[in-house]
């Protein structure tokens, strides 16, 4: 599926709609350059699935991962990874990657860093620039 959004709110709407389709075991790889909206997209999913519209969702820039409990047994725990600073894929084991794979829904910013540990069955969300400063093209592939 391809979506064009003309504002941050448009991206939030797409992400919220996408969130309703998720199930435990899903891995979402969020690709796109700096500032494209990977965190905006992730935050909207997290707020929807935790049913907390105002939840503070910091970028896990230094901790590399942040978990969120959801009230929905169909989702379980939400794992939000930002792997920009991951030095090698082996380091994933120190931040709970194996637990994440068996206990919920995984969101990954900078999934290129997963390298050979990239799960085979993942959903890829790629965000690229649109024609204006606040437009984006969002491609979702299963
Ligand atoms: N259509 C849009 N969709 C998403 N974000 C938008 C849009 N238009 C403007 N923005 C702005 O772009 C920025 C996106 O920032 P965000 O932190 O989500 O990017 P990111 O891809 O996570 O970057 P990083 O690689 O640094 O983690 C925000 O400041 C947001 O307000
Ligand atoms: Mg980000």
Image (spheres, grey):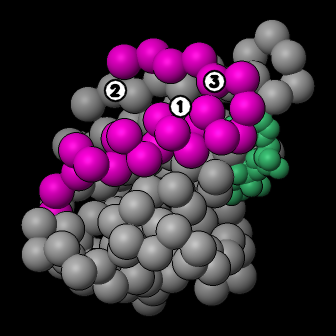
Q: Mark 2 touching mark 1, by CB under 8 A? A: yes
Name the secondary structure under disc 1. Answer: strand
Say above or below: 84 vs 131: below
134 or 37, which is in the foreground? 134
Hey, which residue is sitting farthest right in the picture?
A: 133
Question: Which residue is painted at 11% across and 75% down in the image?
Answer: 73
The question of residue 79 being in magenta is answered with no
Name the secondary structure under disc 2. Answer: strand
Say above or below: 94 vs 57: below
Q: Which mark is residue 126?
A: 1
Q: Quadrant of ligand 2?
A: bottom right
Question: Rounded to the nearest whole Å, what is the CA distance between mark 2 and mark 1?
Answer: 8 Å
Q: Which mark is residue 141?
A: 2
Say above or below: 132 vs 105: above
Q: Position of residue 8 (x, y in %)?
A: 71, 40
Quarter that holds the N terminus = top left
Query: Who comes first in sequence, dot 1 or dot 3?
Result: 3
Query: Who comes first in sequence, dot 2 or dot 1?
Result: 1
């Amino acid at each position: 599926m391809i979506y064009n959004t003309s504002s941050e709110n448009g991206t939030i709407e797409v992400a919220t709609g996408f969130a309703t389709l998720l199930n435990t075991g899903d891995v979402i790889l969020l690709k796109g350059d700096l500032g494209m909206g990977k965190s905006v997209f992730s935050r909207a999913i997290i707020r929807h699935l935790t049913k907390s519209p105002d939840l503070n969702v910091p970028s896990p820039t230094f901790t590399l991962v942040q978990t969120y409990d959801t009230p929905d047994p169909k989702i379980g725990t939400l794992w939000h990874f930002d792997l920009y600073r991951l030095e090698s894929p082996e380091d994933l084991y120190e931040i709970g990657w194996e637990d994440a794979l068996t206990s919920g829904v995984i969101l990954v910013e900078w999934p290129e860093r997963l390298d050979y540990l990239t799960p085979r069955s993942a959903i890829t969300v790629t965000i690229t620039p649109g024609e204006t400063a606040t437009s984006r093209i969002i491609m979702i592939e299963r």
